[in-house]
Image (cartoon, rainbow, N blue to C red):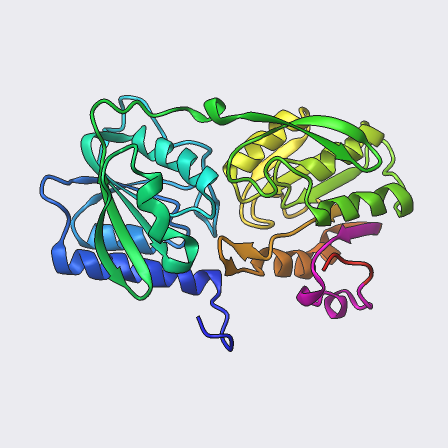
């Protein structure tokens, strides 16, 4: 995209879905394809294109967007037949891609096809090399700086799954809380490390923010694997912790990392009781969805957090200077990374 226009996540997803739609309008579904598993179609555009082409859609989303539910792994069992075709949105990194390819293959019949759809600047050009263990990937189409790749699902391939096969233990030094070993999974934010923003927020918590009292409610908004809440709970285990994130795999990790907390999967505030109020809200909100800019989580936090705090409650967040959150908070931004 040109320097004068930064593509938003919604615009990018619409562009990719339109390429799939145009391809299906031109070529239709492959012969013998009835059931199609659509993976990580955040905005539903690919699902609608498949339905218009006459396919029976099955879905798996690891992200909850809008009113669309998410799950940490595709539904299995004999009640739902295997798909003939799986269409996978290229994830943001190859570790996440490997997990999601295996997840898709777990619901794809032997001899079925896997399509991977992604933009040129997301690394789709190198995808055939990463898919070589399945066979030679064919480029079906290149349009609007988007590629559709196709590869078969060999009968001898046994997918690695379910989700617990991908669990990793990572040890992090958390400011104010010491060393902790946490569960993590490919594709999670800052997988295997403590990012600079979270480190800074934890340093501020340890030095400048009073600990919540026993029984007070703390929300980790956009919790990821729950690192912020874990660090605070190490100092005050008797507070009541609530964690929410759009990523169902992230919330799976958060439940494992902070047993006893209330953990919800949902888009921004959608998963939380609207009457619930908090003494403290913590957040290191995302500013991107994959390779595209996406301020939705940050804007939702800034707009609704004041009404979600109890009298005297605090919002403690960290973000980049370029996000310009000071005016929204009615103050000059403090110390921020970047």
- Residue 203, given in percent of the width and then of the height, sits at 83, 44
Instruction: Tell me which corner region of the image, top left, top right, bottom left or bottom right, holds residue 37.
Output: top left
Q: Is residue 338 magenta?
A: no
Residue depicted at x 60% and y 53%: 286
Spot the residue most to the left: 31
Instruction: Tell me which corner region of the image, top left, top right, bottom left or bottom right, holds residue 131.
Output: top left
Image quadrant for the N terminus? bottom left
Residue depicted at x 72% and y 64%: 321
- Give, as a single range, the part of the protein colored magenta: 313-333
Q: Nearer the viewer, residue 100 or 131?
A: 131
Seen in the image, is 257 located left or right of residue 207?
left
229 up-or-down from 163: above or below: below
Seen in the image, is 11 located left or right of residue 172?
left
Residue depicted at x 65% and y 32%: 262
Q: Is residue 318 magenta?
A: yes
Number of marks drawn: 0
Seen in the image, is 149 located left or right of residue 2?
left
- Residue 33, given in percent of the width and then of the height, sits at 14, 40
Asked if residue 13 shows in the view, the reply is no
Residue depicted at x 21% and y 29%: 154
307 up-or-down from 111: above or below: below
Asked if residue 285 shows in the view, the reply is yes
Seen in the image, is 105 located left or right of residue 323?
left
- Residue 43, given in percent of the width and then of the height, sits at 40, 55
Q: Nearer the viewer, residue 133 or 61?
A: 133
- Residue 204, given in percent of the width and then of the height, sits at 84, 47
């Amino acid at each position: 995209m040109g320097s004068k226009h930064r593509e938003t996540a919604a615009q990018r997803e619409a562009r990719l879905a339109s390429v799939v739609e145009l391809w299906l309008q031109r070529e239709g579904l492959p012969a013998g394809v009835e059931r199609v598993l659509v993976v990580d179609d955040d905005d539903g555009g690919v699902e609608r294109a498949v339905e218009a082409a006459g396919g029976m859609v099955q879905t798996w989303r690891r992200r909850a967007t809008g009113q669309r539910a998410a799950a940490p792994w595709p539904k299995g069992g004999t009640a739902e037949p295997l798909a003939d075709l799986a269409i996978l949105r290229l994830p943001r990194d190859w570790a996440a891609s490997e997990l999601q390819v295996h997840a898709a293959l777990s619901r794809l019949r032997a001899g079925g096809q896997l399509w991977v759809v992604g933009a040129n600047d997301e690394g789709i050009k190198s995808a055939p090399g990463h898919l070589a263990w399945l066979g030679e990937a064919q480029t079906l189409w290149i349009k609007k700086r988007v590629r559709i790749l196709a590869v078969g699902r060999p009968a001898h391939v046994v997918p690695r799954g379910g989700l617990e096969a991908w669990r990793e233990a990572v040890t992090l030094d958390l400011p104010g809380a010491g060393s902790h070993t946490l569960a993590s999974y490919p594709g999670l934010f800052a997988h295997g490390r403590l990012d600079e923003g979270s480190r800074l927020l934890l340093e501020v918590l340890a030095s400048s923010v009073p600990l919540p009292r026993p029984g007070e409610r703390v929300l980790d908004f956009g919790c990821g694997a729950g690192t912020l809440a874990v660090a605070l709970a190490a100092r005050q285990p008797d507070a009541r912790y609530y964690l929410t994130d759009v990523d169902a795999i992230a919330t799976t990790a958060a439940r494992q990392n902070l047993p006893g907390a209330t953990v919800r999967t949902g888009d921004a505030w959608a998963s939380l009781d609207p009457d619930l109020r908090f003494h403290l809200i913590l957040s290191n909100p995302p500013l991107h969805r994959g390779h595209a800019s996406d301020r939705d989580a940050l804007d939702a936090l800034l707009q609704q957090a004041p009404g979600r705090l109890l009298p005297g409650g605090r919002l403690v967040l960290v973000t980049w200077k370029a996000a310009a959150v000071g005016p929204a908070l009615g103050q000059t931004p403090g110390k921020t990374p970047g």
